[in-house]
Image: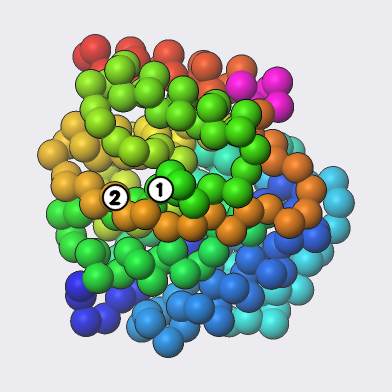
Amino acid sequence: MEEYINISICIPAFNEQRNLREAVEDLIKTLSSYVQKLDIIIVDDGSSDSTPQLAEQLAKGHYQVRVVHHAKKMGIGSCYRDALALAQGDYFTWFPGDHENSAQEFILCMPHLRKDTVVTCYHRGQDPRSLLRHFISQSYTWLLNKFFRLNLKYYNGLTVFPTFVLRSLNLVADGFLFTAENLIKAIKRGYKVVELPAPLRGRLCGKSNALTFSSVVQITKDIFKLLIWAKN
């Protein structure tokens, strides 16, 4: 692990007025004593509730927090890329605005951080979601492994990248495939991947947007774009 860690964290948030404050405060409380600089970038993805106002309040109350607003919903992948463009840290990751994950996952990642290494968490055996969600997640992982000839345990976990690596990958996914795209492109570039088991906290309020019709359509489109990229 590097002695001084500067990390930027994107928080995509679409209508997360009930969860966003806890997500931000979890990151600050958990990580502030472990990193030299914590750079949190909330990206409000065209929310129609009070998420935009709450994000601004959090930025005023915490010097570690900055805010980007989308005038309309552009997708979680777009949120990720916009935050990446502004990132000041040597490492970059994301943290869901619904606070489904715990910031403790990043503590597990820190001993493994290197300039040639990507560190990701998986939740197999420690996932409180329904059996249907388990089946969908496992099927999704199996398909991506088959499509891209890999053997990863999970593609949707919190993943910490050296920032310069991400900025070299030409990321294009707008939907939830963005986590898989990052991993696949980094692996194909020859970067090492460390996979770590971590419990999933579970979402306490609201419903996930990952399996809505529009999200599934976007994932399908992004998979085709990634397959075309892999063939070139």
Q: Quadrant of the N terminus?
A: bottom left
Direction from residue 190 to residue 84 in the image, left or right? right
**What residue is shown at x 64% (from left), y 59% (from top)?**
99
Tell me which numbered mark, 1 or 2, is placed earlier along the sequence: 1
> Which kind of residue does numbered mark 1 sit on?
Tyr
> Which kind of residue does numbered mark 2 sit on?
Glu
Majority secondary structure of magenta residues:
helix
Give x and y (percent) for residue 20: 70, 62
Q: Is residue 51 visible?
A: no
The circle on residue 122 is: 1
Q: Is residue 213 magenta?
A: yes
Circle 1 packing at 10 Å, graded few (<14), some (14-19), many (20+), is many
Looking at the image, the residue that sits furthest to the bottom is 33
Front-most of 216 and 125? 125
**What residue is shown at x 54% (from left), y 72% (from top)?**
27
**What residue is shown at x 73% (from left), y 38% (from top)?**
72
Magenta segment: 212-216
Direction from residue 207 to residue 68 in the image, left or right? left
Give x and y (percent) for residue 195: 29, 50
Are circles 1 and 2 on residues that touch, CB within 8 Å? yes
Q: Quadrant of residue 213?
A: top right
Q: Which residue is mark 2?
A: 195
- How far apart are labels 1 and 2 at the CA level? 7 Å
Q: Secondary structure at mark 1?
A: strand
